Amino acid sequence: MSGEEFTELNRGSFWGRGASLLPSILAALLVAAEPAAAQTVWTAPEGQSYAMLPEPQKGTPVTGGVMLCDQQVWTLSLATEPGAEIEGADGTATLIALGQRFTVQSSRGDSSIDLIVPYDALEPMKASSRLQIEFSADNPPVRFSLAGSRRAITAVEQNCSPRQLPTENLIELETASVFLELGRRLRAEDIRDFIISTNQLAELQVAMLELEGDRRLFFVEICGSSWYYGVSGCNISGFARFSAGASDPAELDLNGWEPVFESEGVHLYREPGQSNDGWPNLVTIPLKPGFPDKLWTWTGQRYAVEGTIQAELRTGQD
């Protein structure tokens, strides 16, 4: 996904204040980074969720950098010379790695610039030899060597804290539901294949959403085996009903239900106030950290991934 798409999909209304980073943390790390300015490779201290960058190429006011991961949000904080004027540092910047360009949020502090790094930029940063950061045509680009970045960024990923989830937007799946048998019927083939392949009983949870126009959106999750359903061991499918059917769930009317969504190992949310043709936007957050959150929108027939979600820029919050 391009950086331009990432910018369009920044949804502060969804995350609220839950993913904010403390400016004092980055400030302390930048001070610690100064003595290490002469280092030539990326370094991640053992057990920590940040990496120290090597000394940048000369010719800009940037003197060092730290990349921190907190609640699955990645922030690249650049130390600058005191009082340095860098046009375009407030707003957006462009990260370039492995020939790919990412438009990212940028915020200027007293002696630092903080950039929110999209998840999609991590792999190019691991694989490339040089990171270039552009703020405006009037400023020379900031360049860092990416030597050692794969090892350092991977170590930070492993130590990054999990997302604190906004529970008010959660689509709650339940085992004790009058719709549980309907879920078993709709996913009967999946359950059969699961039992045959794993010799285990499938664990089901369901959730029913009532929408305007007598439409319904029904989610059925199967859990039980990380071998069968990936690292989380869970798979969730969504079914849509475009007109009113049986009002009594005990009737188990299977007619009219169409599969419209599928994912593995995620928490499922509605994006408040956002929909397409009356079908709510969905946000999926991986049960296991280290994977991107995704935004799903209605295409007219089913749900498709529109892009990834990134938390609101922390320095733009009160």
Image (cartoon, rainbow, N blue to C red):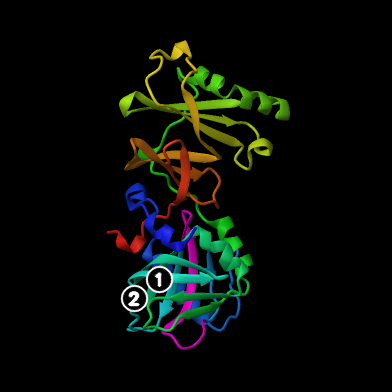
Sequence-wise, which precedes: disc 2 or disc 1?
Answer: 2
Q: Residue at x 58, y 35 (%)?
A: 234
The x, y position of residue 19, in whole percent, is: 40, 53
Give the magenta-colored segment's residue range.
Answer: 56-74
In the displayed structure, 10 sits above or below 204; it is below
Q: Looking at numbered disc 1 in the image, what kind of residue is underneath it?
A: Ala
The circle drawn on residue 65 is none
The circle drawn on residue 88 is 2
Q: Is 230 on the left or on the right of 34, as rendered?
A: right
Give the SS element for disc 2.
Answer: loop
Residue in the foreground of this view, choosing between 275 and 132 = 275
Q: CA distance from mark 2 to mark 1?
A: 7 Å
The x, y position of residue 174, in whole percent, is: 47, 26
In the displayed structure, 156 sits above or below 308; it is below
In the displayed structure, 292 sits above or below 155; it is above
Q: Is residue 70 magenta?
A: yes
The circle drawn on residue 93 is 1
Asked where in the image residue 314 lies, by quadrant, the reply is bottom left
Number of residues whose C-alpha sits closer than 10 Å to that of mark 1, classed few (under 14), some (14–19) or many (20 or more): many
Number of residues whose C-alpha sits closer than 10 Å to that of mark 2, classed few (under 14), some (14–19) or many (20 or more): some
Please say if the residues under marks 2 and 1 sit with CB atoms less than 8 Å apart: yes
Residue in the foreground of this view, choosing between 142 and 4 = 4
